[in-house]
Amino acid sequence: SESEDSDLESEDEESDSEPEPPARRPKRGTESKGIEETTTSSPVEAWNGTDEAHPRQNIAVDERLVKSKAQTGLKQYMKNKRRKWGFKFFVLADSSNGYTWDFTVFEGKNHHRTGKGLGYDTVMDLVTPKVLGTGYKLYVDNFYTSRTLFFDLLEKRIGACGTIRSNQLGPLRLKSGQLDKKSPRGCIRWIREGPIVFVQWKDTRDVLMCSTIHKAHG
């Protein structure tokens, strides 16, 4: 279904719910992450010596640059960062306090195990119900967002919301009712594909959002 000038709300039945940690969080040892051997034990375990703690419901995946003087081909240049050179980390953080729950090290664009893109692989590596539990609401930017990712996260009982690039809309891009250059600023259109709602908002440029957390009201 599709509509215009609509409101979005978080699912009422889930708004006050808490995420469900795994029945028993597995201990994770030391694994290779591209920089010799990087420990991947939960940061919370390292902080308080227990595996009982877990993030609050709202979590986010984003990138972080860690400055380093090490001589290695794994260092990345990021022109938009204050420190331009360093190791690029993808981090899973608690949105309420910014605490880093887990991370992976970027090893290069060719490390796509699934063939679904770096953003997809990164999120699926970090958001693992076996370690994290279920019932979370994940927020990401358009580097990570895709229809495939959001559908696959739902199968893990994890909702998601984020901006999305127009080339990720697939067949929905051809649907009628899209905003065009003549549409006034502030106009909104939405269309739903099963459990996913796509929203197009006209600002100084088009803003595209995708969510399995929110529902639309015409």
Image (cartoon, helix red, strand yellow):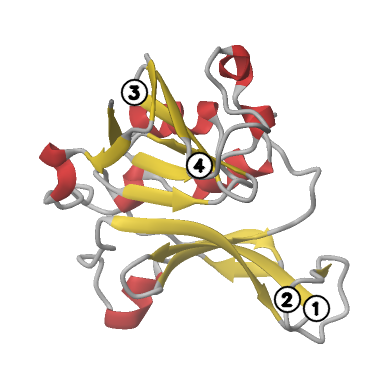
Amino acid type of the residue tagged 4 in the rendering:
Met
Q: Which residue is mark 2?
A: 81
Query: In the figure, is residue 74 to the left or right of 22?
Result: right
**Disc 4 versus disc 1: nearer the observer:** 1
Q: Which residue is mark 3?
A: 195
| Residue in front for this viewpoint, 51 or 132 | 132
Query: In the figure, is residue 123 to the left or right of 165?
Result: left
Q: Which residue is mark 1?
A: 84
Q: CA distance from mark 2 to mark 1?
A: 6 Å
Q: CA distance from mark 3 to mark 1?
A: 40 Å
Mark 4 residue crowding within 10 angstroms, few (<14) / some (14–19) / many (20+): some
Q: CA distance from mark 2 to mark 4?
A: 25 Å
Specify the label residue 124 is tagged with: 4
Mark 2 residue crowding within 10 angstroms, few (<14) / some (14–19) / many (20+): few
Q: Earlier in the sequence, mark 4 or mark 1?
A: 1
Kindly check if marks 2 and 1 are in contact, taking CB atoms under 8 A apart as contact: yes
Which quadrant holds residue 10?
top left
Where is residue 67 drawn, in percent x and y? 72, 83
Kindly check if marks 4 and 3 are in contact, taking CB atoms under 8 A apart as contact: no
